[in-house]
Image: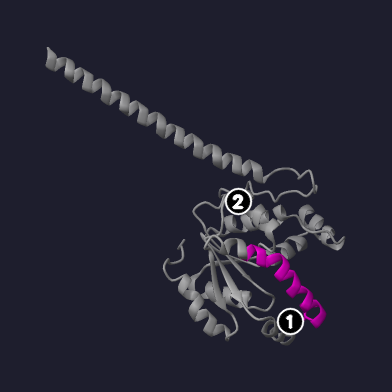
Amino acid sequence: MLGRLQLASQICILRTAQASTRRRQAGQQLSTATFIQNATMSSTTAAHPQTGAKDIDLSGAGFPVTTLNRSIVFVLGGPGSGKGTQCAKLVEEFGIVHLSAGDLLRAHMKSGSPDGNMVAQMIKDGQIVPSHVTISLLQKAMADSGQDRFLIDGFPRNDENRNAFEQQTGTEPDFVLFLDCPEDVMEKRLLGRQEGRTDDNIESIKKRFRVFVESSMPVINHYEGKGKVRRFDATPPPSEVFEKVKNLFVQRPAKKL
């Protein structure tokens, strides 16, 4: 009799544990679904009350708009430090997706969409494009790529950009690739690159240097305090710089589709 009672008790305990496990798993699934749904809903907000600017609609992108399980590297450095050159080499060597915030904004303005026209008008009127607009463009580009490794070039430009990125995406970069280069070297490169940019003149270059020091260096200092900055001397020729930079990326192969 005692043996049968003990057996019945053990069966009861086992069934209770199994039921608890099923409830816990169901709760986890619900939390995940709710998180993705909330993230998607937040990305399609009609307009921001302070600026009136609309978010980019990501609802049809086919991917959650969060950046979970994605590797993100901010590539920062002064004008002429070689950010674009090093990103191009990393793309060629490792197949990492390179996203330029400036290029995305320019393409958005040329798209002829209502949102693109709105951004173009804001720039024409001398207004600063709200961070959430640029971040939404970055999120959509990441979702559309189908990849999971990203170089974000030239963003965030200031602490407000940085804070907005972390708040909107719910993540931080894996690390910051900082191309440290003296101003005299960057100035010589900018004056000699002959790309037809209207801001590649000595007066504009000096102003861009000041903006970088005053606005972007605080971003680098913030992440340096977290041990996330990988600083490289960008004075040598690009090929020499790349031989050192690429060591940051050789541990994990690019995702294959």
Examine the image and state in which quarter residue 18 appears.
top left
Tell me which residue sits at (22%, 22%) in the image: 10
Left or right of 51? Residue 71 is: left
The amino acid at mark 1 is: Glu
Q: Residue furthest front?
A: 225
Dominant SS of magenta comes to: helix
CA–CA distance in space, label 2 to label 1? 34 Å
Left or right of 77? Residue 196 is: right
Q: Position of residue 254 (x, y in %)?
A: 46, 66
Tell me which residue sits at (69%, 76%) in the image: 79
Q: Position of residue 237 (x, y in %)?
A: 58, 86
Q: Is residue 249 above or below residue 21?
A: below
Query: Pointer 2: what residue?
Result: 169
**Which stretch appears magenta?**
195-220
Query: Pointer 1: what residue?
Result: 195
Per the rendering, the mark at residue 92 is: none
Q: Secondary structure at mark 2?
A: helix
Report whether residue 118 is seen: yes
- Frontmost residue, 168 versus 145: 168
The amino acid at mark 2 is: Thr
Tell me which residue sits at (22%, 19%) in the image: 9
Mark 2: few/some/many CA within 10 Å (<14, 14-19, 20+): some
Q: Position of residue 210 (x, y in %)?
A: 75, 72
Q: Is residue 39 above or below residue 183?
A: above
